[in-house]
C-alpha cells in the first residue's frame, strides 16, 4: 500500500499507482502499554489507515509525534484511562467528527469518523468502540443497547445518503455461534445475549455487508482471546471486531483478513487486527 518517496530531501508517505486502500481495525488495549507492539505491526502491515480502539489516553497525551514521524495523519478522541479511539492515516483526512450522534450527555469517548481521500474514491470511516455491557442485565447493558440504537440511526443516515462508508471497530458483539469457539459460555454474557445479537442484526439488515462473512462463512475466525484461562493457547476465541460496509463500499471490497499471529507476540493486546482492502 504505502510507498515512501523523497520530496526536497524529506521522506514522505505515498501510494503506488493503482494500489488498493488497506484499512485495519485494532483494539490495542492501551496505547502506552502497546506502542512497541503497535509500531512493529504497523511497519509490517503496509497500511493506509489504522482505526484504533481503547487507546486509554487523553488527546494531549497520545504519542502523536511518534506516528506522524511514521508518516501518519493523526486524529484522536480520547478519555483518561478508559475507552478512546484514534485514526492513523497516510492519506488525507477530511471532515473529522467526534462522538456518536443521538445523546449529547454521553461523555464516553467511543466514536470518531472522518473521510479518507483515496486515489480513486473517498471513503467515510466510522471508528467505534461499542460498550461491553456487562454485567447484564443492568445499567451498563441498557447503555450498550441504547448506544447500538444510536449506531443504527447513524448507519441508516449513511445509507440514506448513499455514502461509500464503513463502520469498523470493536463491537463487543458475537454475531452468531460460529463466531465463538465455545458459544454456550457466552449465552448470558452481554456479548452474546439474544438482545445484543438482535440489535446487531437490526443494524446489519439495513443493508450493510459484514466484510469477513462476505469472504468466508467458515467458523474459527476470531479476533479476541481473553488473557485468562489459557484462551489463546487453547484457541478459545471469539469474533467481536467487525467491518460493516455500505453497498457503495462493499462494491469496492477485495479482501478481508485477520492478523491473528499478532496475538502470539510479546505484550500483546487481547484483540488482534482485522483489515480490509478496497479498490479505492
Image: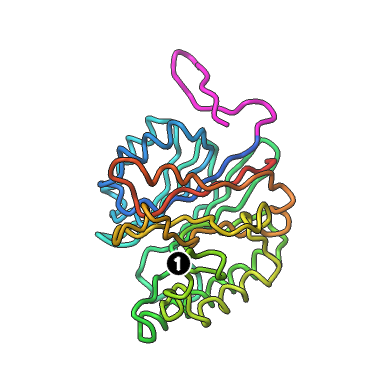
- The coloring applied to the image is rainbow
Please name the residue shown 33% across and 36% down the image.
Answer: 65
Please tell me which residue lies in front, 100 or 276: 276
Looking at the image, residue 199 sits to the left or right of residue 44; the answer is right
- Image quarter hosting the N terminus: top right
Looking at the image, residue 273 sits to the left or right of residue 156; the answer is left
Q: Position of residue 197 (x, y in %)?
A: 55, 76
Please tell me which residue lies in front, 272 or 163: 272
Please name the residue shown 35% across and 84% down the image.
Answer: 139
- Above or below, 26 relative to 185: above
Q: Position of residue 164 (x, y in %)?
A: 68, 54
- Above or below, 194 relative to 9: below
Please name the residue shown 30% across and 48% down the image.
Answer: 31
Number of numbered discs on residues: 1
Picture quadrant of residue 247: bottom right
Q: Rate crowding at label 1 as few (under 14), some (14 to 19) or many (20 or more) other CA atoms within 10 Å.
A: many
Magenta stretch prevailing secondary structure: strand
Taking the magenta stretch, the answer to whether it contains residue 205 is no
Residue indicated by mark 1: 172
Taking the magenta stretch, the answer to whether it contains residue 4 is yes
- Above or below, 29 relative to 4: below
- Image quarter hosting the C terminus: top right
Q: Position of residue 21 (x, y in %)?
A: 61, 39
Residue numbers of the magenta segment = 1-19
Picture quadrant of residue 205: bottom right
Please name the residue shown 31% across and 52% down the image.
Answer: 59
- Above or below, 185 relative to 12: below
Q: Where is residue 160 in the image (x, y as percent from the top left)?
A: 71, 67
Q: Is mark 1 on a helix, strand or loop?
A: loop
Q: Which residue lies furthest to the top in this view?
A: 9
Amino acid at each position: 500500500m504505502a510507498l515512501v518517496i523523497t520530496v526536497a530531501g524529506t521522506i514522505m508517505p505515498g501510494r503506488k499507482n493503482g494500489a488498493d486502500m488497506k484499512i485495519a481495525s485494532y483494539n490495542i488495549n492501551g496505547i502506552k502499554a502497546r506502542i512497541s507492539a503497535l509500531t512493529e505491526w504497523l511497519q509490517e502491515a503496509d497500511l493506509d489507515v489504522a482505526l484504533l480502539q481503547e487507546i486509554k489516553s487523553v488527546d494531549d497525551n497520545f504519542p502523536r509525534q511518534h506516528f506522524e514521524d511514521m508518516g501518519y495523519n493523526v486524529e484522536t478522541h480520547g478519555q483518561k484511562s478508559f475507552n478512546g479511539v484514534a485514526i492513523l492515516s497516510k492519506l488525507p483526512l477530511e471532515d473529522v467528527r467526534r462522538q456518536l450522534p443521538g445523546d449529547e450527555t454521553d461523555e464516553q469517548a467511543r466514536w470518531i469518523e472522518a473521510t479518507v481521500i483515496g486515489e480513486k474514491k473517498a471513503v467515510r470511516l466510522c471508528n467505534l468502540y461499542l460498550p461491553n455491557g456487562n454485567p447484564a442485565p443492568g445499567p451498563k447493558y441498557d447503555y450498550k443497547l441504547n448506544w447500538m440504537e444510536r449506531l443504527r440511526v447513524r448507519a441508516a443516515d449513511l445509507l440514506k445518503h448513499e455514502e461509500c462508508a464503513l463502520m469498523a471497530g470493536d463491537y463487543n458483539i458475537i454475531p452468531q455461534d460460529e463466531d465463538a469457539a465455545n458459544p454456550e459460555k457466552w449465552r448470558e454474557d452481554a456479548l452474546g445475549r439474544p438482545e445484543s445479537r438482535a440489535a446487531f442484526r437490526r443494524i446489519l439488515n439495513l443493508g450493510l455487508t459484514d466484510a469477513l462473512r462476505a469472504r468466508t462463512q467458515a467458523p474459527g475466525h476470531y479476533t479476541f482471546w481473553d488473557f485468562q484461562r489459557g484462551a489463546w493457547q487453547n484457541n478459545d476465541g471469539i469474533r467481536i471486531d467487525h467491518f460493516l460496509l455500505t453497498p457503495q463500499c462493499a462494491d469496492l471490497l477485495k479482501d478481508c483478513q485477520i492478523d491473528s499471529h499478532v496475538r502470539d507476540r510479546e505484550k500483546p493486546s487481547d484483540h488482534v487486527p482485522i483489515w480490509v482492502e478496497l479498490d479505492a
